[in-house]
Image (cartoon, rainbow, N blue to C red):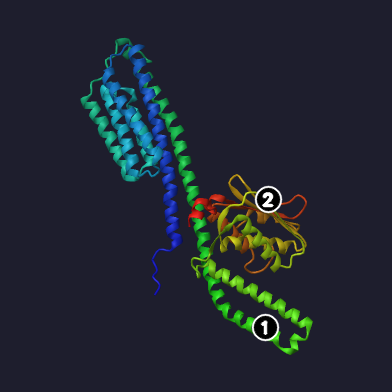
Amino acid sequence: MAVTTDIPATEVTTRWNAAHGETAAGHKNMQQLIQLRWIAVIGQITTIAVVTMVYGINLPVRHMLEVLVCLIAFNIGSQLRWHERRVVTNNEVFLALLIDVASLTIQLYLSGGTTNPFAFLYLLQVILSAVLLEAWSTWTIVAITSLCLAGLSKFSDPLVLSHAQSDSYFSLYVQGTLLCFAINAALVVFFVTRISRNLRTGYAQLANLQQRATEEEHIVRMGLLASGAAHELGTPLSTLSVILGDWRRMPEFANNAELREEIGEMQTQVLRCKSIVSGILLSAGEARGESSVKTTINTFLNDLTEEWRASRPVISFDYDNRIERDMPVVFDSALKQMICNVLDNALEASPQWLSMEAECEADSLTLTVRDAGPGFAQSMLSQFGKPYQSTKGRPGSGLGLFLSLNVARTLGGTVTATNREEGGALVKITLPLATIAIEEDDEHGE
């Protein structure tokens, strides 16, 4: 009895991919916080130097530098941690912002509390938390920063300014307030824009992954339908094969050369149908352990083209294998069917001539199929690889390229299509060799 789960595989894939997209955005946002912290360190060192040396204000420089040393050590640790680790949770971003709030609070306590115009930098922490954190974390940051301001107003000592510095219209406090506003505005625009771009990129990746999951679910449904049809076709094909064999031995047909030739052609086509059915069942997992074949790249391509040429009514087929260094690889029936699909489409568009060129470049296998047909319509090129995009006008047309694109994408490759300047179409299949190659040492060791 088969055991099923409540959540389809494609939904599980979608959820995993969504989490993966969110993780990538979270890691980028953590890197933004680390950069912002370095800017804060440089800004604090500059401010302390200017205030003490230029304006002559007495500050506990030693204690403030000790806070900066701790902040630098924390940022170096964060840089090392998030350079290797990619998963960033809401709690970890929340903790990082709490460290920033704590550092700012201590520095403000040592330099005048709420009389220090840079107290408005708390707003930057609140804005960042609103963009980066979940709702409960954001409100916690709001509550903590409010308590910190209240505590600073009660327990910290105000800045001691000279009469000239405090009473003039453009006083030192007003200058500091204007500078704090400019810093806040610049940092908010710069970092929130970059963080928002990271989030938009994550949402775009998520939408793309959801589309891929939908396409994969469509493929699964087609695979189940094809597997069921292959099971049903197996028996009548075997019956036809037996009947044709009996006919071939009957005197009425054996003595007629023309009928004997037609029966031979019928047997060839029945064998081809049986081979297709076996390939469908193999791709569906009906013969486990046999779908992947260890061979070499040249052997696979040469055998595939010879078999395809012998079983199709092609008039002129140019095959150019430019692969100089042969290598052990693993190919399965899905990849073979994908290449045959592309060749079949080219043959249907151009019965007189087509070509396939194979070469290895930049650690990738590239197969280029050309034909002399009418080429692709612009509307098809813009929707290339989508199901049911075809000019053939038949139900189910356009699935061949759709399946080919998804097989290549599963292997980390691509399928692209263009129109040739001299007429006809060009379809290029690119597959990374790392996904199909076998280490030669492993090959000999088995």
Q: Which residue is drawn at 57% across and 68% down?
A: 279
Which of pointers 2 and 1 lies earlier in the amino acid sequence?
1
Is 70 on the left or on the right of 18, as rendered? left
Residue 413 placed where, x, y %? 57, 52
Kindly tell me whether residue 386 is visible in this rendering.
Answer: no
Picture coordinates of residue 313 (x, y %)?
A: 73, 68
Under circle 1, the secondary element is: helix
Quadrant housing residue 338 = bottom right
Neighbour tally class for label 2: few under 14, some 14-19, many 20 plus, Cα within 10 Å: few
Q: Where is residue 264 in the image (x, y as percent from the top left)?
A: 71, 78
The reply to whether discs 2 and 1 touch (Cβ–Cβ < 8 Å) is: no
Is residue 374 visible from the viewing direction of this image?
A: yes
Q: Which of 446 and 428 is in front in this view?
A: 446
The residue sitting at 35% across, 40% down in the picture is: 93
Q: CA gap, disc 2 to disc 1?
A: 42 Å
Tag shown at residue 366: none
Q: In which image quadrant can residue 236 be found?
A: bottom right
Q: Which structural element holds mark 2?
A: loop
* Structural crowding at the residue carrying mark 1, measured as other residues with C-alpha within 10 Å and reported as few (<14), some (14–19) or many (≥20): some
> Is residue 437 or residue 167 the one in the foreground?
437
Q: Which residue is drawn at 39% across and 42% down?
A: 85
Q: Name the residue under label 2.
A: 322
